[in-house]
Image (cartoon, rainbow, N blue to C red):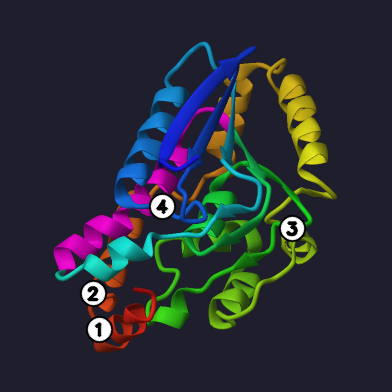
Amino acid sequence: MTQPYVKQTIENEVATIEFFHPAHNSLPGDVLADLAQTIIDAGNNNDIKVIVLKSGGDRTFCAGASFKELISINDEATGKIFFSGFANVINAMRTCPKFIIGRIQGKTVGGGVGLAAATDYCMATKFAAIKLSELNIGIGPFVVGPAIERKMGLSAMSQIAIDANTFYPAEWAMQKGLYTKVFDSAEDLDKAVVEFTENLKTYNPKAMTEMKTMFWRGTEDWGQLLAQRAKISGRLVLSEFTKETLKRFK
């Protein structure tokens, strides 16, 4: 696999949405836009009862934002548009009327932690360590922060946001509420995801939609909130500190 993609497969009323990028599943703007639209379309498809979100490859779930695009940002408007990519995906997941099940096979960083947090039920392997590395480059997890705080609590979110050099193990993430279960292998994870979704799709879809609305109560302002957070990140990415730091990644 060498080309980025977002693809969806539907089998027995379960939609699997998979994204991939050869740079450790980092996500540029076009892939984020495609991912957001695919989630919206799946939410509107009456042939789908449950959605599974996963990434391609065996090792990294998501390395977060694309450094190649970060380096190329030269004005605040472009910066806001770039960081709005993750905001749009999170909001698509939040407003989707179907439960989204996360399948996290490996390490996840920055925006990838936000995607995992925005799922409604998330399972992982023991290799799925997490890190919020944004402070390392002079910004912060502003856009994904609300989703992570909602799932893990302010204390855990602030801990990993400040300790931006450390990968926290999957077991820790499970204890803090990000993951519901942690498995020894991707094979065990996939088996559990299939069993879980096969059972979940037998439930009343209207009841699941009402439950999802209940679970996400209090996030109705996220359309505006995440846009404001994207603007903050778009401004900070232009700082001298961040520009100098990003040069190391060229």
- Check disc 1 and report the residue beneath it: 239
Q: At 16% from the left edge and 71% from the top edge, which residue is drawn?
A: 74
- Check disc 4 and report the residue beneath it: 27
Q: Nearer the viewer, residue 235 or 147?
A: 235
Query: Depth-wise, is mark 2 or mark 4 nearer the camera?
Result: 4
Q: At 62% from the left edge and 26% from the top edge, which residue is drawn?
A: 208
Of mark 2 and mark 4, the one earlier in the sequence is 4
Query: Depth-wise, is mark 1 or mark 3 nearer the camera?
Result: 3
Q: Is residue 6 above or below residue 218?
A: above
Of mark 1 and mark 4, the one earlier in the sequence is 4
Q: Does the segment drawn in magenta span residue 91?
A: yes
- Check disc 3 and report the residue beneath it: 127
How far apart marks 2 and 4 lie (CA) works out to 20 Å
Q: What SS does tag 3 mark? A: loop
Marks 1 and 2 in Cβ contact (< 8 Å): yes
Q: What SS does tag 1 mark? A: loop
Point out the stretch of residues depicted in magenta: 76-99
Q: Amino acid at mark 4?
A: Leu
Residue 6 image-quadrant placement: top left
